[in-house]
Amino acid sequence: MTIETLNSLDRAGFVSAIGWVFEDSPWVAERAWEERPFASVDALHRAIVKQVERALPEEQLALLRAHPDLGIRARMTEASTAEQAGAGLDQLTPEEFERLRELNRTYRDKFGFPFLFAVKGSTKQDILGAIGRRLQSSPEEEYRVALEQVYRIARFRLEDNV
């Protein structure tokens, strides 16, 4: 799809076309539609990030919580499944799977949302290292890092599809 095509869509078509880039959160695209036309993918990305930044804290938290735990195959969108497979998370050894499962649980218990990491271009070792390091963050620091990771995920998805 081209940026021109996106710009020409009505609200429902626009949301249908890119509402999925923020996991189970089409409200972001719905709000960004008002800012059309977009000159580029960069402009579109800035507009959708702005909508998340303007959102209520509970909307932001719901957005973070909409993402699946990394390496766990339950309840994943097609995009998440493909991204995680690209990082080797579909080929974890039983020991790696158990370690990631435990780290995910510890992270979620500490921060109240899943560990978020834009996996494109990363390996399973990169991801396991990152979750271990980020468990040392404060809740405030990690909330900001998690949002930044969601923005990176959305950027990768837009680049792959627009």
Image (cartoon, rainbow, N blue to C red):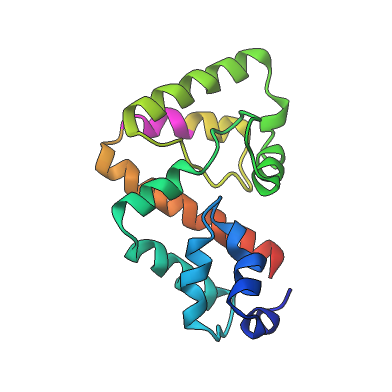
Residue positioned 54% across, 17% down in the render: 99
Residue positioned 53% across, 74% down in the render: 44
- For the N terminus, the quadrant is bottom right
Q: Where is residue 21 shown, x and y percent of the image?
A: 59, 58
Q: Which of the two residues, 31 or 40, is positioned nearer the viewer here?
A: 31
Quadrant in the rendering for residue 109: top left
On whether residue 39 falls in the magenta region, the answer is no
Identity of the residue furthest to the top in this view: 95
Q: Which of the two residues, 51 or 89, is positioned nearer the viewer here?
A: 51
Q: Which of the two residues, 134 or 32, is positioned nearer the viewer here?
A: 32
Please say if 19 is above or below 35. above
Query: What secondary structure is the magenta-colored segment mainly?
Result: helix
Quadrant in the rendering for residue 70: top right
Q: Where is residue 153 shown, x and y percent of the image?
A: 55, 53
Please say if 2 is above or below 62. below
Quadrant in the rendering for residue 91: top right
On whether residue 133 falls in the magenta region, the answer is yes
2 horizontally vs 158: left or right: right
Please say if 101 is above or below 47. above
Count of numbered marks = 0
Magenta highlight range: 130-136
Residue positioned 66% across, 73% down in the render: 13
Q: Where is residue 105 shown, x and y percent of the image?
A: 45, 23
Q: Where is residue 80 shown, x and y percent of the image?
A: 64, 44
- For the C terminus, the quadrant is bottom right
Residue positioned 40% across, 22% down in the render: 106
